[in-house]
Image (tube, grey):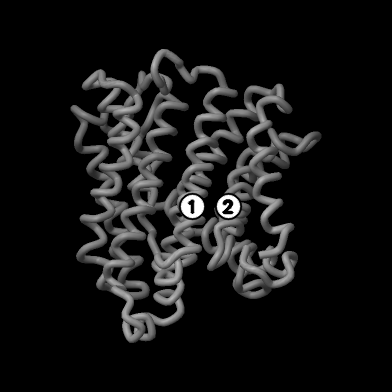
């Protein structure tokens, strides 16, 4: 690995960590906090799609599972936030395991359809479980995250909390990709028959990576509940799942950096008026109104012009090394 490839992540981490020290705008800090939550989902989805080659159209459901679990534990059961946060990841992982065991024996678009159906079922479950979730009216009054005696109330504190979790997730995921699990996922992505012939437990790899990606989505949901203080079934829709998948597709395969860059860019697109100085509200409104169409256009352009996505571009810039 080239020296530049070792230095860039540390520089990027330093810039991200210094964000609240460089930015005074509280709204912009909140936007960047939302970016971190989406990046957390994409870290898991990039392992699932970009490394193992499995498609999920239901990851917003795992985000919702985590959000509602944390809300129920902290509000209904009055347990500490850290308990709700950890349980959110476990419940989402359990949901991923329940979905993975039968459906990951499917291939191609059949697997995508199974995850799509799971997402729709979970949206219905969030609505129907009204005594627990608040139904269509949503769940409000969720407290800010608290660890010990410190309450993460200020935008800067929430930013550091979210990006701290993202940093840990990226470190764990990067280690996975560099070790035997990463080689097994790449073999599975390249050719399932070839992976089986090489002695890879393909079903086991699929289940483990699916459970991990679901857990990260659940943790992102728990953070969302604590930051926003409100969750609703309308947030965790199939449309949100498609947006997550678009970030992973545009980001490219065999890379964590590419999907992270794509997640940052596509999330900021919907807050273009906050991040682009001088951009008129009319232009921002048009961009926000047609953002799904822009995502679709971006996917088409990536498929035609850069099949390896942002990851491929980063590899070219890095001289062909792994991004």
Q: Position of residue 56 (x, y in %)?
A: 38, 61
Answer with left or right where residue 270 lies relative to residue 172.
right
Quadrant of residue 295 in the image?
bottom right
In what element is the residue under mark 1? helix
Q: Position of residue 181 (x, y in %)?
A: 40, 65
Q: Is residue 91 above or below residue 1?
A: above
Q: In the image, what residue occupies the spot 47% across and 46% down?
A: 169
Q: Bin the neighbour count of mark 1 within 10 Å (Cα to Cα): few under 14, some 14-19, many 20 and up.
A: many
Q: Residue furthest right?
A: 278
Q: Position of residue 293 (x, y in %)?
A: 58, 56
Quadrant of residue 223 in the image?
top left
Answer with left or right where residue 186 lies relative to residue 129.
right
Q: Is residue 120 above or below residue 133?
A: below
Along the viewing direction, whichever of 159 and 118 lies nearer the viewer: 159
Tell me, yes or no, if residue 189 can be seen here.
yes
Q: Which residue is mark 2?
A: 260
CA gap, disc 1 and disc 2: 7 Å
Q: In the image, what residue occupies the spot 46% across and 27% down?
A: 227
Q: Position of residue 277 (x, y in %)?
A: 78, 35
Along the viewing direction, whichever of 176 and 235 lies nearer the viewer: 176
In what element is the residue under mark 2? helix
Q: Which residue is mark 1?
A: 43
Q: Bin the neighbour count of mark 2 within 10 Å (Cα to Cα): few under 14, some 14-19, many 20 and up.
A: many
Q: Is residue 257 above or below residue 165?
A: below
Pointer 1 with pointer 2, Cβ within 8 A: yes
Quadrant where the C terminus sits is: bottom right
Answer with left or right where residue 164 lies relative to residue 297.
left
Q: In the image, what residue occupies the spot 68% across and 31% down?
A: 18
């Amino acid at each position: 690995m080239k020296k530049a490839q070792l230095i860039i992540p540390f520089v990027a981490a330093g810039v991200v960590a210094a964000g609240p020290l460089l930015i005074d705008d509280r709204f912009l800090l909140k936007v960047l906090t939302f970016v971190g939550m989406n990046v957390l989902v994409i870290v898991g989805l990039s392992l699932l799609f970009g490394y193992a080659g499995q498609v999920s159209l239901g990851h917003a459901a795992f985000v919702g599972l985590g959000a509602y679990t944390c809300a129920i534990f902290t509000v209904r059961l009055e347990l500490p936030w850290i308990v709700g946060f950890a349980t959110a990841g476990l419940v989402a992982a359990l949901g991923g395991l329940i979905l993975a065991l039968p459906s990951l024996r499917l291939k191609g678009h059949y697997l995508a359809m199974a995850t799509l159906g799971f997402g729709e079922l979970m949206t219905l479950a969030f609505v129907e479980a009204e005594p627990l979730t608040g139904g269509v009216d949503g769940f409000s009054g969720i407290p800010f995250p608290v660890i010990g005696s410190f309450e993460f109330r200020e935008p800067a504190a929430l930013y550091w909390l979210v990006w701290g979790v993202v940093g840990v997730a990226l470190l764990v995921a990067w280690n996975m990709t560099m070790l035997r699990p990463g080689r097994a996922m790449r073999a599975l992505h390249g050719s399932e028959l070839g992976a089986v012939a090489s002695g890879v437990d393909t079903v086991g790899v699929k289940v483990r990576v699916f459970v991990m990606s679901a857990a990260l989505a659940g943790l992102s949901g728990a953070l969302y509940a604590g930051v926003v203080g409100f969750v609703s079934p309308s947030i965790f829709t199939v449309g949100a799942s498609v947006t997550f998948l678009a970030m992973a597709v545009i980001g490219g395969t065999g890379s964590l950096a590419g999907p992270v860059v794509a997640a940052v860019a596509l999330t900021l697109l919907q807050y273009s008026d906050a991040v682009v100085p001088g951009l008129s509200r009319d232009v921002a409104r048009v961009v926000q109104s047609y953002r799904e169409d822009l995502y679709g256009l971006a996917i088409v352009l990536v498929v035609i012009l850069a099949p390896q996505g942002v990851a491929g571009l980063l590899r070219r810039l890095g001289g062909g090394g792994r991004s």
